[in-house]
Image (cartoon, helix red, strand yellow):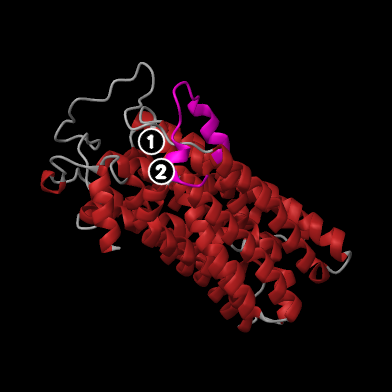
Amino acid sequence: MLARERTVAGPGFNRWFVPPAALAVHLSIGQVYAFSVFNIPLEERFGASATAVSTIFSISIVMLGLSAAILGTWVERNGPRKTMAVAAALWVAGFLVSALGVSAGQLWIVYLGYGVLGGIGLGLGYISPVSTLIKWFPDRPGLATGLAIMGFGGGALIASPLSNRLLGLYGGEDPVAGLVPTFVTLGVVYAVLMGLGAYVIRVPAQDWKPEGWTPPEKSDETSMRTTADVTARNAIRTPQFWLLWTVLFCNVTAGIGILAQASPIVQNFFSGVGPAAAAGFVSLLSLANMAGRIVWSSTSDVIGRKPTYMLYLGVGALLYLGVATLGRTSLLLFVLMSVVILSFYGGGFATIPAYLKDLFGGLQVGAIHGRLLTAWSAAGIAGPLIVSGIQDLQTARGEEGADLYLLSLYIMVGVLVVGFVANLLVRPVDTRFHESDPDPDDELETQGASS
């Protein structure tokens, strides 16, 4: 049932059944963006610092990128259903093992559960729907990647208030007491959703194309969109790959550091904001994250990927500067700027697969995307550590409130400027890296052996 050949769509299959299947998986694993709801209860449970607890999130993001990079070719070969099933098993196991760690009072078990096992599930669950939808929507790759990744950004929109509600339901006035049953409940819910997604998913037949769509014959030499193909093995040898790696790293570092600490940040910026309101703020950021993935990635189909990233990184840097200098003057202004920033953050994730397809073709875009996600792994370490590390340092100096985060915000402005410059340097891939007569099956076998 899990074999790739069992998932090839038959004649007449409606490709619009695929986005809901992808959405079910990404809504589930997108819970990782709501992890900050658990930060304060976990700090109290283990008597740990903000850095020690945020490391759980960082490990999961690191494992996401590493598993996507190492197993990207395995995903292409075995198909989305098997990949989604394995992702579901690991993601759910991460919650159950974490519940065991909280119950036993052992933080390292939570690192192993949510961080390592859950992180591998994140990586597999993330790239499989993306590569599948790109195959179903060659006529609109930006829309396709937006549809696939939209759920990942919106997962916290559901998970944040749900987790907060479950903590109160199970723990009453003591959210620490509600951690274990909350983790178990979330694991069960996500097992059902991801299982349904794996059951519905299909891949198109090899000769399938959208009705009425004609593939472009040949790309212009100066065009950012190529009709040629580059293998994953050759892609990492190009400067374009590493420039896009830098672009993604900078965009993610700036966003993920704030998102991982969103709940405590808003509570420290504004003393009148309590845990429930902070959870609502996290949900609002998740809504912006989700909306940005579909709105901005679809926009990139019209204006191009490179100009879109100029918007993400250039305007994003100005907005971070605005939060640092003006954010404390008004809660409404703080929220509005944060919402736009997170829409750019989400849009960056959704647009990067289409950017890769433009530059490297569609032959192994899933495997190339997986390798590029190591930038997310690196950012998953850098972003939260910058924010939580400076927070701990400022706390030791006796600072409080918004002053705990101002230096972090200024650092993020610089990070985005670096990404802006890297994006400006992106050019079309040299023809010497193109495949003259690509054979997807042979190439996957070769790449699998090298992996």
Mark 1: give few (<14), some (14-19) or many (20+) Cα within 10 Å: many
How many marks can you see?
Answer: 2
Residue 56: which numbered mark, if any?
A: none
- Residue that appears at 16% across and 44% down: 434
| Viewer-nearest residue: 12 or 51 | 12
* 16 in the magenta segment: yes
Q: Tell me which residue sits at (41%, 43%) in the image.
A: 131
Q: What residue type is labelled 2?
A: Ser
The boundaries of the magenta stretch are 1-21
- Find disc 2 in the rendering and name its residue: 131
Vertical placement of 208 versus 59: above or below? above
Q: In this view, does 53 lie above or below 92?
A: below
Is residue 381 visible to us here?
yes
Corner quadrant of residue 305: top left
Q: Quick check: 445 left or right of 110? A: left
Place of residue 164 in the rendered image (x, y in percent of width and height, measured from the top left):
77, 57
Q: Which secondary structure, mark 2?
A: helix
Q: Residue at x 41, y 35 (%)?
A: 142
* Magenta span includes 49: no
| Real-space Cα separation, disc 1 to disc 2, in angstroms | 7 Å
Quadrant (top left, top right, bottom left, bottom right) of the C terminus: bottom left
- On screen, residue 304 versus residue 98, left or right, reads left
Q: Residue 155 at x, y = what percent?
A: 62, 48
Give residue 135's mark: 1
Q: Quadrant of residue 211?
A: top left
Tag 1's secondary structure?
helix
Residue lying at the far top in this picture: please name it: 212
Residue located at (71% from left, 62% from top): 267
Residues at marks 1 and 2 touching, judged by CB atoms closer than 8 Å? yes
